[in-house]
Image (tube, rainbow, N blue to C red):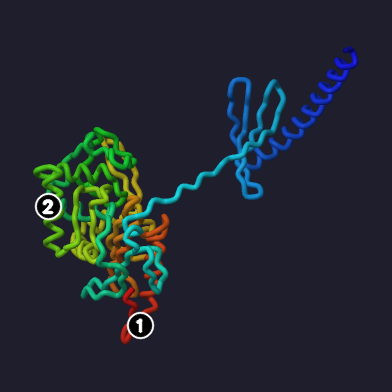
Amino acid sequence: MFKFALGALVSLLFALASSSAGAAHGAAHGASVQKKHGLKRVKAGARQQSVRVVAESGERRVKRVIVVRGKRRVVYQRVTSVVIAAKPTMGDLAGLNLTRDPLDLKSSVALVLDQSNSEVLFEKNANVALPIASITKMMTGLVVVEARQDMDEMLTITDEDVDRAKFSSSRLKVGSELTRANMLHIALMSSENRAASALGRNYPGGLPAFVDAMNAKARTLGMADTRYVDSNGLSKQNVASARDLAKLAIAAFRQPLLRQFSTDPKAIVEASGHPMQFGNTNHLVANPGWDIGLQKTGFINEAGRCLLMQAVIEGRAVIMVFLDSKGKQSRTADAGRMRKWLEALKPAGMSLPGG
């Protein structure tokens, strides 16, 4: 019995010594790692810990440096990565993503035409109606401007403007008051959904009458494949073809206010007397290498990334439309590919791919 107790005591002392040495080494290493990577230390009662995700041999592990009863210990925990496949867009379901083109565009739909004579320079699935997301807001702006509503009138964000379908975020709180001009500005520049909703709601007859006016304007412009059900583009039922959107861009370009508001890189607007800074959802407008006169971006899961843009390239004013683009920056990257292709075209006798 005595031998058994003595053996247990020796084993315990040996374990404590090893733990102390390991803790000292872990403390020194942990301090070095923390200094190098600027880790934050979080107190939790009698315990402090620093967390760092490390990748070794292709697996992810979380490194924790903890202090228990005055002793530091380094613990690694495996992190299981769950990859969630992206939901297919309406374009994917229609098989448009299988269409190949000479420029290897990441957009399932593309159209480029000469603004002066509507000559088609490039097209790919341009007659297919797809969800257009926040490109909807360009029609919203056109209806507001042509209705000649008072731009200085104060509009209020209400609970009706809150998105309860897709739960999109907004910096405008319920009760925020902005002029109609500021609502239109951030709706076009920053794709502010609540602002676009408020614009439609404050039209004579309310939102239903505003949506009717949007669809009526589309018919007037010859946009046969277009349908609107809201003023912000959150519904997948807002659909149009690229050819229709090119007609919208040509009409909207005639309105100086839409050109200005959609292409401002950033702006400060007053919301309930407080200044708020907003930026443009299209980073190309701040690029000095681009001459952009009108633009609108869009995104919902069903639509993919979308872009409507007027630009001057090699002295030629063109309208560009990209729908159902894959990847966060793919729509602007496609615009860059198209620009290089247009710059390389010969002015006469050129052979153009039809897409």
Which residue is outermost to the right?
3
Disc 1 from disc 2: Cα separation: 42 Å
Does residue 68 appear left or right of residue 182 in this picture? right
Which quadrant: the C terminus?
Answer: bottom left
* Residue type at tag 1: Lys
Which residue is outermost to the bottom?
349
Residue to which mark 2 is pinned: 213
Where residue 177 appears, as percent x and y from the top left, is: 23, 37
Which residue lies at the image location 22% right of the left edge and 73% below the top edge? 118
Query: Marks 1 and 2: which is nearer the front?
Result: 2
Q: Which label's residue is closer to the chain start, 1 or 2?
A: 2
* Residue type at tag 2: Ala
Which quadrant: the N terminus?
Answer: top right
What numbered label is drawn on residue 109? Answer: none
Q: Quadrant of residue 272?
A: top left
Does residue 223 appear left or right of residue 299 in this picture? left
Q: Nearer the viewer, residue 191 or 108?
A: 108
Relative to 10, residue 131 above or below: below
Where residue 210 appears, as percent x and y from the top left, is: 14, 48
Residue 317 in view here: yes
**Secondary-structure class at tag 2:** helix
Residue to which mark 1 is pinned: 346
